[in-house]
Image: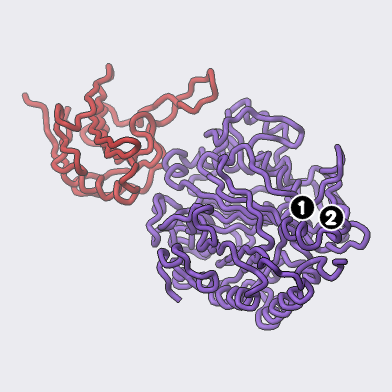
Amino acid sequence: MAVYCPTWMPSPLDGRIGGQWDNGVSIRRDRSYLVSFLWHEPPAQDVHVNFRGYPGRTKMPLCEDDNAPPGRRRLIACFRDPKPARRIGRFRVTPYTVNEGVDQWHVLYLWRSGGSLFTVSQHVAKPLTYRRVVADLDRLVRGLVRVDPAA
Amino acid sequence: MKLTRRELLVGGAAATAVAAAGVYELVDELTEKPVRRFGGGRAPEQHLLDGMRIAEDNGVEIVVPTLHHQIVTARLAPGLTDLREAQRTLEDVLRSLDDDYEDTPAGLAVTVAWGLPYFRAKVAAAANRHLPIDRRASASGRPKRALLDAIRFPSDPGETILEDNDAAFLFRSDRFEHIQSGSTRVIDRLDGIFEPTSIRKGFAGGGFEGGKGLPKALAQAAGVPGADLIPDGSELFLGFTSTQRHALGPPRIVNFETLGLVDLGPRGYFHGGTHMHLSHIYENLEAWYLDFDFAERVDTTFRPRLRVEPGTRTVPQPPQSAASPRDVRSDFRRFGAIGHSSSMQAATRLQADVMGADGTLYRRGTAVPQRADFNTLDNPFFWSSQPERDGMTDGPAAGLHFVVFNPSSDDFHRGRLAMDGVLPDGTRLPFAARARGQGLNSVLQTTHRQNFLVPPRRHRSFPLAELRA
């Protein structure tokens, strides 16, 4: 499947896998992937960006609800509280403001392309504000470049 | 008058701060004044405001709150001995305001409330005789007054300051200049009688006719974190309307005498009076809007699994659907969460029909407390005489100056404890302090609390001073 690579990242992140701010690449059995970049300054300052892809499917992924009553298992949409969809460059993204797992407390942009679902999210944490994160994501998405798999 | 926040924080005089506008100056630029119906005469009760407008949203009647609010807390000047003269001076300035302004949102409403330090230090003997006794709170032991010292609640941080002001002046109006002028006149005239301890300013509503509403517009203008996440038109920062007609007590239900909760003593001196709780609460807007989705915000603000259309701001809370302690316990067992409103309804709604002393039949499920709270960007106050103790910090912060009228301190405490899962039937739901299942509580941080007595208008100035031996 195609992936989307950034040509701009919020400072100090550089988007280089294996680089200084690489926070891990993981691929699940369903072939969905997570690529994460993190700058962390103790005690609580973060610049944290996650890229996700769900090859071959466009349905909203489901996550375990961490807030279910003890002993009960509940699945919920991984990305919730959608805001009106927006056109950013070549992408029509839907922003989500309540997200699960490593995207918790992130603003997340979701788009569908070629039968697959993609997201990029950024943490709203000091020194950043919600407004700044939205501006960062707008710029980041505008600069995304599609990279198709080599034959 | 324009002062920078820094100028205010580093020791600006109260008399200057009381008239300063700061970021709140924007309020008049961001709103159109609602058209008001004017009422005639002043009610015997200080806490009532005539001519409140009723609007409708989502088919629910809303009492439109006044746009502007200001509170000045104060201590009596050291060495003040001539209380009768002070009484005449205060009454004189209050009457002059009564003469100059309608007692409606278009004019100016002034409510003077008195704290226990005043009653203990200045009129102790008369207070012993005339301060109302809370019959219900006294039922299981020694007599308890309707006015008690404030307490910290389970979800309060240990640092919450329990204040000891002698008095508090609440100013309400749709016109900011009326508040500026009125409060300045009071403070100037009472120089040498009172020493202000804090000035607190804020706003509410402004979005019922469309637009962003004041909370969002002012939070955005101030650059408060999470401001952009506040839904357009919200009455308050947290996105839901809190002044539904059914969620507020009817006008005289909080009078000491109305529900029979309070024994007014031998002469009924405080007949027509009530109790006021005042607190300041920080609100973490980013936590509220980034960690709770809409359904969770509804669940924890109202009741778990309540079906509400996404984007709804005003959620019906009719008397017939008021929750009982049993409902709250059931919600906790099933969902590990309780609703802010439903948990409190067990303590704040009438559990049976009551024929009030005013001749009104108050039906089961009727709300008792009358909220007069308002959002603020104070951090935590606009001005403080003790900036270090009060934690005065530069820059704006989203918060709430919580003002509510109840028939007694104990009545307020019951409702507030229920909000923390301590129900009036004795049930204690095992929540950790500010647990997520408490929803609202998990994003709130109370910094200050105090209880006050609001005398009837005829005794609003230095109550009991004329009876002092």
Q: Is residue B190 above or below residue B442?
A: below
**For residue A17, what is the image quadrant?**
top left
Q: Nearer the viewer, residue B79 or B361?
A: B79
Q: Name the residue under label 1.
A: B147
- Name the residue: 84% across, 55% down: B132
- Name the residue: 57% across, 43% down: B301
- Name the residue: 42% across, 24% down: A64
Q: How far apart are marks 1 and 2 (CA)?
A: 8 Å
Chain designation of label 2: B
Using the image, tell me which numbered label, if any, was put on residue B134: none
Q: In this view, does B381 lie above or below A44?
A: below
Q: Is residue B63 left or right of residue B469?
A: left
Residue B31's spot in the image, x, y percent?
Answer: 48, 70
**For residue B277, what is the image quadrant?**
bottom right
Question: Can residue B255 be seen at all in this image of the molecule?
Answer: yes
The C terminus of chain B lies in quadrant = bottom right
Total of numbered circles in the picture?
2
Q: Which of B415 and B269 is in front in this view?
A: B269
Q: Residues within 10 Å of mark 2 (few under 14, many from 20)?
A: many
Q: Which of A129 and B246 is in front in this view?
A: A129
Q: Nearer the viewer, residue B48 or A11?
A: A11
Q: Name the residue under label 2.
A: B132
Residue B223's spot in the image, x, y percent?
Answer: 37, 57
Type of amino acid at the residue the image marks with label 1: Leu
- Chain A colour? red
Q: In this view, does A140 lie above or below B425?
A: below
**For residue A98, what is the image quadrant?**
top left
- Chain B colour? purple
Chain designation of label 1: B
Type of amino acid at the residue the image marks with label 2: Pro
